[in-house]
Image (cartoon, grey):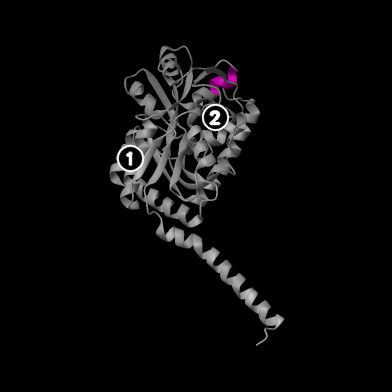
Amino acid sequence: MRTSRRQLLQCSIALTLAAASMLWMAPAAVAQDYPSRPVTLIIPWPPGGATDIAMRAIADAAARHLGQPIVIDNKPGGSGAVGPATMAASAKPDGYTISQIPITIFRLPLMQQTSWDPEKDFSYIVHLTGYTFGVTTNVDTPFKKWQDVIDYAKANPGKVTYASTGLGSTNQLGAEFLAAEAGGLKLTHVPYRGGAPAIADVAAGNVDLFFANVSEIMGMARGGKVRVLALASSRPTALAPELPLLTKDIPALDINNWFGLVGPAGLPADIKDSLAKLFLAAMADPANKETLDKQGLIALGQGPQAFAAYIKQDRERWAKVVKQGNIKAE
């Protein structure tokens, strides 16, 4: 029996559609089987630090929902950039290697050349939490609230000094953003190599202000050595619920050292969604919430799309600050 060209063409089309259907179904099959083995979570900080402790608590809670162990792999270095950059360069986009990602991975490319592209090299999974920051001063200064700083700095350009933990840090960028939003205050930056010497000089009265991580400063504030004027946050922290919020008058003054989770570029959407739901459930775990409260962390809780949108908006904010101040990372 002879086969016509039309029959051959119809057969070819049918085979092509069948192959395409199999390819389209493959990711779904993978997602249905996920996870079938332990998931590795890269934490880009040394073991035992505040963020490491917080991430391990989140991971423990997530593992109870995941049905598989979450194996922690500490890869410190580069202000938190080495771990996620290594993952982006070497891990498969299958959901079995993910990384905590700090704000630095998005801000550093604004200030220096990097080996990664934050818009192309990562799949955004979930926006987890962030450290609350507040404006801190010496107890002997006349500053009792943020408006006092604004009034004095406007009348005395350049005389108000502020400490930071280094060029390009949240301490510097946050202070510069606050100054810009207050009408372009001229403050004098005094960089330090670390938070401890910066806090010590604020307490000693050698520098006027420090845009501080509240979890690192509240002990001294409770001891009467420094004064926290206000929080740059849209919500209070469990460490100091009595502190006023700068966002009450200016919503844009919502600044925190946030972090979330990412996978390599190309991570299937259904795996991202599955991981996001698991880690968001972990954030609601009572034991995990207690750990976060002790660290001064606030729950942010955004899935893949909202996380990606937030990153875009946040990068635009810091790009403007970096450009206006001509800020370079160390």
Query: Magenta segment range?
Result: 151-157
Q: Looking at the rendering, which quadrant does residue 119 occupy?
A: top right
Name the foreground residue: 182 vs 304.
304
Q: Residue extending furthest front?
A: 1
- Residue lying at 48% horizontally and 20% vertically, measured from the top left: 209
Q: Quadrant of residue 196?
A: top left
In magenta stretch: residue 45: no
Q: Quadrant of residue 204?
A: top left
Predominant SS along the magenta part: helix
239 lies above or below 164: below
Residue position for label 1: 57
Precedes in sequence: disc 2 or disc 1: 1
Residue at the (36%, 17%) spot, across then down: 225
Question: Can the viewer see residue 113?
Answer: yes
Question: At 56% from the left edge and 33% from the top edge, which residue is drawn?
Answer: 107
Nearest the viewer among 42 and 258 is 42
Amino acid marked by disc 1: Ala
**Residue 26 locus on image (x, y percent):** 50, 62
| Front residue of this view, candidates 253 and 309 | 309
**Of all residues shown, which one is farthest toward the bottom?**
1
Mark 2 or mark 1, whichever is nearer to me: 1
| Label 2: element kind | helix
Q: Which residue is mark 2?
A: 178
Residue type (three-letter) at the residue carrying disc 2: Leu
